[in-house]
Amino acid sequence: MAYEYTLIRSDRRTLAIEITEDARLVIRAPRRCPAAYIRSFVENKSGWIESHMEKQRIRAESRIPLSEDDVTGLIVRAKREIPPLVEKYAAIMGLRPASIKITRAQKRFGSCSSKNRLCFSYRLIQYPREAMEYVVVHELAHIMHRNHGKDFYALIESVMPDYKERDRLLKK
């Protein structure tokens, strides 16, 4: 099946597929990657592409647009509710973030910088508390482990044995 897609070339080493919020296909490729190889890659991933495009279409149809007042209210709630969760789990894990910031990030729920600064998207406040706690523990674990290796997940599991179920809440 031939797909229409946007091709973005950069100084990356691998090919990547992105399905945007509005169910468009974006392929990211190394600058010198041959076009034929890219087409073959897309064809080989057709099953994955189809299923994820359908998921994005369903999400897009069920998404309720937020007004600026709605977003402001969610940011206020996030600033009130997320830092205490960070403090609670940081104490349990024996870790100390340099700072905590609430952002308007759209593509990720949280991040941890190399200087141990934690950022959380205001969107996280729209999810169940169990999901919020998982993201907090996940980002705190990055202070100790900068990757998603087995030690990283072992640390998360030591604090939150049901982390996999909590993670699934973010994908609904």
Image: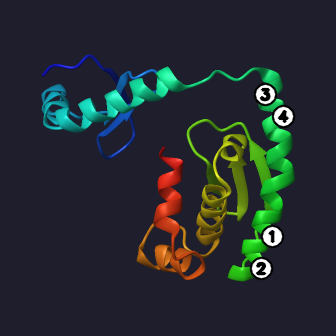
Q: Which residue is mark 3?
A: 70
What amino acid type is highlighted by mark number 3? Asp
Q: Which residue is mark 1?
A: 87
- Report how far apart the C-alphas of labels 1 and 2 lie in the structure: 6 Å
Dot 4 alpha-carbon crowd within 10 angstroms: few under 14, some 14 to 19, many 20 or more: few
Residue 33 visible in the current orientation: yes
Tell me whether the residue at label 4 lies in contact with that at label 1, contact meaning CB atoms closer than 8 angstroms: no
Query: From this viewpoint, which residue is outermost toward the top?
Result: 4
Number of numbered discs = 4
Tell me whether the residue at label 1 lies in contact with that at label 2, contact meaning CB atoms closer than 8 angstroms: yes
At 56% from the left and 25% from the top, the residue drawn is: 63
What amino acid type is highlighted by mark number 4? Gly
Q: Secondary structure at mark 2?
A: helix
Q: Earlier in the sequence, mark 3 or mark 2?
A: 3
Q: Is residue 84 left or right of residue 95?
A: right
The correct choice, above or below, for 41 with respect to 136 in the image is above
The correct choice, above or below, for 165 with respect to 36 in the image is below
Q: Is residue 140 left or right of residue 39?
A: right
Q: Which residue is mark 4?
A: 73
Of badges 4 and 2, the one in the foreground is: 4
Q: Which residue is mark 2?
A: 91
The percent position of residue 61, horizontal first and vertical second, equals 48, 21
The correct choice, above or below, for 133 with respect to 144 in the image is above
Dot 3 alpha-carbon crowd within 10 angstroms: few under 14, some 14 to 19, many 20 or more: few
Q: Secondary structure at mark 1?
A: helix
Residue 42 occupies which quadrant of the picture? top left
